[in-house]
Amino acid sequence: MIPIAEPLKPFLREALLASRSVLVFPAADGSMRPRDTPLQDVLRRALARAGLVNGYDHGCRRCKANGTPHVEHHDDAARRHCSTCGMKLWPKPVHRPIRFHDLRATTATLLARAGAPLVVAQRILRHSDPRLTANVYSRVDLGDLREGLNRIGIPAMPKLATANLRTRRRLSPWCPRRPQRRKRGGVTPQTISMRSKTYVSRGDRI
Protein backbone atom coordinates (compact mmCIF):
# COMPACT_ATOMS: atom_id res chain seq x y z
CA MET A 1 0.00 0.00 0.00
CA ILE A 2 1.26 3.47 -0.96
CA PRO A 3 -0.02 6.42 1.08
CA ILE A 4 -1.44 9.51 -0.57
CA ALA A 5 0.63 12.67 -0.30
CA GLU A 6 -0.95 15.32 1.89
CA PRO A 7 -0.82 18.12 -0.76
CA LEU A 8 -2.81 15.88 -3.17
CA LYS A 9 -5.72 15.21 -0.82
CA PRO A 10 -7.57 18.51 -1.51
CA PHE A 11 -7.43 17.83 -5.27
CA LEU A 12 -8.76 14.28 -4.83
CA ARG A 13 -11.50 15.50 -2.50
CA GLU A 14 -12.57 18.09 -5.07
CA ALA A 15 -12.55 15.44 -7.82
CA LEU A 16 -14.77 13.17 -5.72
CA LEU A 17 -17.27 15.96 -5.13
CA ALA A 18 -17.36 16.82 -8.84
CA SER A 19 -17.69 13.19 -9.97
CA ARG A 20 -21.07 11.76 -11.02
CA SER A 21 -20.29 8.36 -9.52
CA VAL A 22 -18.12 6.75 -6.87
CA LEU A 23 -15.15 6.83 -9.25
CA VAL A 24 -12.54 9.54 -8.96
CA PHE A 25 -11.85 10.03 -12.67
CA PRO A 26 -14.77 8.45 -14.52
CA ALA A 27 -15.72 8.74 -18.16
CA ALA A 28 -17.99 11.49 -19.46
CA ASP A 29 -21.14 9.48 -18.58
CA GLY A 30 -19.87 8.61 -15.07
CA SER A 31 -18.94 5.01 -15.89
CA MET A 32 -15.54 3.37 -15.61
CA ARG A 33 -13.14 3.99 -18.42
CA PRO A 34 -12.32 0.99 -20.64
CA ARG A 35 -9.02 -0.82 -20.26
CA ASP A 36 -7.81 0.31 -23.68
CA THR A 37 -8.12 4.00 -22.78
CA PRO A 38 -5.12 5.92 -24.18
CA LEU A 39 -3.91 7.34 -20.88
CA GLN A 40 -1.06 9.24 -22.50
CA ASP A 41 -3.56 11.21 -24.60
CA VAL A 42 -5.51 12.06 -21.45
CA LEU A 43 -2.28 13.13 -19.77
CA ARG A 44 -1.22 15.28 -22.71
CA ARG A 45 -4.58 17.04 -22.87
CA ALA A 46 -4.39 17.72 -19.13
CA LEU A 47 -0.90 19.19 -19.55
CA ALA A 48 -2.17 21.34 -22.44
CA ARG A 49 -4.98 22.75 -20.27
CA ALA A 50 -2.33 23.59 -17.66
CA GLY A 51 -0.18 25.35 -20.27
CA LEU A 52 2.64 22.77 -20.16
CA VAL A 53 3.19 22.42 -23.90
CA ASN A 54 5.94 22.84 -26.48
CA GLY A 55 4.49 26.04 -27.88
CA TYR A 56 1.48 26.69 -30.11
CA ASP A 57 0.85 26.36 -33.84
CA HIS A 58 -1.20 29.34 -35.04
CA GLY A 59 -3.09 28.40 -38.21
CA CYS A 60 -5.28 30.37 -40.59
CA ARG A 61 -8.55 28.63 -41.46
CA ARG A 62 -9.23 30.74 -44.57
CA CYS A 63 -5.84 29.96 -46.10
CA LYS A 64 -6.33 26.29 -45.24
CA ALA A 65 -9.72 26.26 -46.99
CA ASN A 66 -8.16 27.89 -50.06
CA GLY A 67 -5.54 25.15 -50.28
CA THR A 68 -2.61 27.28 -49.09
CA PRO A 69 -2.31 26.57 -45.34
CA HIS A 70 -0.52 29.18 -43.27
CA VAL A 71 0.87 28.07 -39.88
CA GLU A 72 3.10 30.00 -37.47
CA HIS A 73 4.76 28.51 -34.40
CA HIS A 74 5.01 30.66 -31.26
CA ASP A 75 5.69 30.10 -27.57
CA ASP A 76 2.39 31.61 -26.42
CA ALA A 77 -1.27 31.60 -27.45
CA ALA A 78 -1.59 35.36 -27.88
CA ARG A 79 -3.93 36.68 -30.53
CA ARG A 80 -2.29 37.03 -33.93
CA HIS A 81 -3.41 37.63 -37.52
CA CYS A 82 -2.44 36.00 -40.78
CA SER A 83 0.21 37.84 -42.75
CA THR A 84 -1.42 36.73 -46.02
CA CYS A 85 -5.13 37.47 -45.63
CA GLY A 86 -5.29 39.28 -42.30
CA MET A 87 -7.66 36.80 -40.65
CA LYS A 88 -7.36 35.73 -37.03
CA LEU A 89 -5.01 32.81 -36.36
CA TRP A 90 -6.28 29.93 -34.25
CA PRO A 91 -3.71 28.57 -31.77
CA LYS A 92 -3.34 24.82 -31.31
CA PRO A 93 -1.14 23.48 -28.50
CA VAL A 94 1.80 21.27 -29.40
CA HIS A 95 1.67 18.44 -26.89
CA ARG A 96 4.78 17.25 -25.14
CA PRO A 97 5.89 13.75 -26.18
CA ILE A 98 5.33 12.32 -22.71
CA ARG A 99 3.99 8.92 -21.71
CA PHE A 100 2.17 7.93 -18.56
CA HIS A 101 5.12 5.69 -17.67
CA ASP A 102 7.43 8.73 -17.71
CA LEU A 103 5.78 9.96 -14.52
CA ARG A 104 7.63 7.23 -12.64
CA ALA A 105 10.97 8.79 -13.55
CA THR A 106 9.59 12.20 -12.57
CA THR A 107 8.55 10.82 -9.18
CA ALA A 108 11.97 9.27 -8.58
CA THR A 109 13.74 12.50 -9.51
CA LEU A 110 11.52 14.63 -7.26
CA LEU A 111 12.06 12.23 -4.35
CA ALA A 112 15.83 12.37 -4.84
CA ARG A 113 15.84 16.19 -4.96
CA ALA A 114 13.68 16.32 -1.82
CA GLY A 115 16.28 14.25 0.03
CA ALA A 116 14.13 11.14 0.47
CA PRO A 117 16.10 7.96 1.25
CA LEU A 118 16.73 5.61 -1.63
CA VAL A 119 14.82 2.77 0.05
CA VAL A 120 11.71 4.99 0.26
CA ALA A 121 11.84 5.75 -3.49
CA GLN A 122 12.38 2.06 -4.17
CA ARG A 123 9.29 1.07 -2.18
CA ILE A 124 7.13 3.73 -3.83
CA LEU A 125 8.18 2.70 -7.35
CA ARG A 126 7.90 -1.03 -6.47
CA HIS A 127 11.43 -1.85 -7.61
CA SER A 128 13.17 -5.02 -6.52
CA ASP A 129 16.65 -3.53 -6.85
CA PRO A 130 17.56 -0.06 -5.53
CA ARG A 131 20.19 0.28 -8.26
CA LEU A 132 17.37 0.38 -10.81
CA THR A 133 15.81 3.29 -8.94
CA ALA A 134 19.08 5.21 -8.60
CA ASN A 135 20.68 4.59 -12.00
CA VAL A 136 17.70 4.40 -14.38
CA TYR A 137 14.77 6.34 -12.98
CA SER A 138 16.51 9.14 -11.07
CA ARG A 139 17.66 12.05 -13.23
CA VAL A 140 20.58 14.23 -12.12
CA ASP A 141 21.44 17.43 -13.96
CA LEU A 142 24.09 20.13 -13.54
CA GLY A 143 21.96 22.05 -11.06
CA ASP A 144 21.71 19.00 -8.78
CA LEU A 145 25.48 18.52 -8.88
CA ARG A 146 26.06 22.19 -8.06
CA GLU A 147 23.62 22.04 -5.15
CA GLY A 148 25.35 18.92 -3.79
CA LEU A 149 28.76 20.60 -3.92
CA ASN A 150 27.42 23.73 -2.23
CA ARG A 151 26.39 21.64 0.78
CA ILE A 152 30.05 21.07 1.61
CA GLY A 153 31.12 23.35 4.45
CA ILE A 154 33.95 25.19 2.72
CA PRO A 155 35.05 28.23 4.80
CA ALA A 156 35.08 31.56 3.04
CA MET A 157 38.35 33.30 2.28
CA PRO A 158 39.22 35.77 5.09
CA LYS A 159 39.54 39.41 4.18
CA LEU A 160 42.95 39.61 5.88
CA ALA A 161 44.51 37.35 3.26
CA THR A 162 43.32 39.64 0.45
CA ALA A 163 44.67 42.70 2.24
CA ASN A 164 48.06 41.07 2.80
CA LEU A 165 48.23 40.09 -0.85
CA ARG A 166 47.66 43.67 -1.93
CA THR A 167 50.31 44.90 0.52
CA ARG A 168 52.86 42.41 -0.79
CA ARG A 169 52.20 43.52 -4.32
CA ARG A 170 52.69 47.16 -3.34
CA LEU A 171 55.94 46.48 -1.46
CA SER A 172 57.36 44.08 -4.03
CA PRO A 173 60.83 45.14 -5.33
CA TRP A 174 59.82 44.00 -8.79
CA CYS A 175 57.26 46.77 -9.20
CA PRO A 176 58.13 48.93 -12.22
CA ARG A 177 59.40 52.40 -11.41
CA ARG A 178 58.99 55.57 -13.34
CA PRO A 179 61.94 56.45 -15.60
CA GLN A 180 64.13 59.32 -14.43
CA ARG A 181 64.03 62.46 -16.50
CA ARG A 182 67.00 64.82 -16.84
CA LYS A 183 66.41 68.49 -16.29
CA ARG A 184 67.78 71.13 -18.62
CA GLY A 185 70.14 73.91 -17.55
CA GLY A 186 72.83 71.70 -15.98
CA VAL A 187 70.68 70.53 -13.08
CA THR A 188 71.61 67.19 -11.55
CA PRO A 189 68.46 65.41 -10.29
CA GLN A 190 68.67 63.66 -6.98
CA THR A 191 66.34 60.69 -6.83
CA ILE A 192 64.75 59.70 -3.56
CA SER A 193 62.94 56.39 -3.86
CA MET A 194 60.37 55.49 -1.24
CA ARG A 195 58.82 52.05 -1.80
CA SER A 196 57.25 52.06 -5.26
CA LYS A 197 56.96 55.89 -5.57
CA THR A 198 59.73 58.08 -7.00
CA TYR A 199 60.38 61.70 -6.02
CA VAL A 200 62.80 64.03 -7.88
CA SER A 201 64.23 67.12 -6.18
CA ARG A 202 66.20 69.95 -7.81
CA GLY A 203 69.91 69.93 -6.77
CA ASP A 204 72.75 72.45 -6.98
CA ARG A 205 73.95 73.73 -10.31
CA ILE A 206 77.33 72.46 -11.52
Image (cartoon, rainbow, N blue to C red):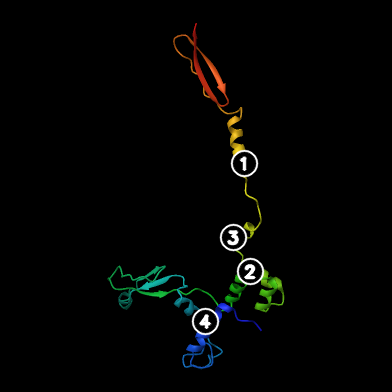
Mark 2 in CB contact with mark 3 (< 8 angstroms): no
Dot 4: few (<14), some (14–19), or many (≥20) neighbours within 10 Å?
A: few
Pick whichever of labels 4 and 2 is earlier in the sequence. Answer: 4
Single out the mark in the foreground, 4 or 3: 4
Residue type pointed to by label 2:
Ala
Residue type pointed to by label 1:
Leu
Q: Which residue is mark 1?
A: 160
Q: Which residue is mark 2?
A: 112
Q: Residue at x 61, y 67 (%)?
A: 113
Q: Residue at x 60, y 73 (%)?
A: 105
- Residues under labels 4 and 2: Cα distance? 24 Å
Q: Which residue is mark 3?
A: 142
Q: Which residue is mark 4?
A: 11
Q: Which of the pair 158/104 is nearer the observer?
A: 158
Where, quadrant-wise, is the N terminus in this rendering? bottom right
Helix, strand or loop under label 4: helix
Q: How many marks?
A: 4
Pick whichever of labels 2 and 3 is earlier in the sequence. Answer: 2
Dot 3: few (<14), some (14–19), or many (≥20) neighbours within 10 Å?
A: few
Query: x, y percentage for residue 5?
Result: 59, 79
Q: What numbered label is drawn on residue 113?
A: none
Residue type pointed to by label 3:
Leu
Pick whichever of labels 4 and 3 is earlier in the sequence. Answer: 4
Residue type pointed to by label 4:
Phe
- Residues under labels 1 and 4: Cα distance? 56 Å
Asked if residue 101 is positioned above or below residue 165 in the image, the reply reads below
Q: Residue at x 58, y 29 (%)?
A: 175
Helix, strand or loop under label 2: helix
Pick whichever of labels 1 and 4 is earlier in the sequence. Answer: 4
Query: x, y percentage for residue 150?
Result: 62, 57
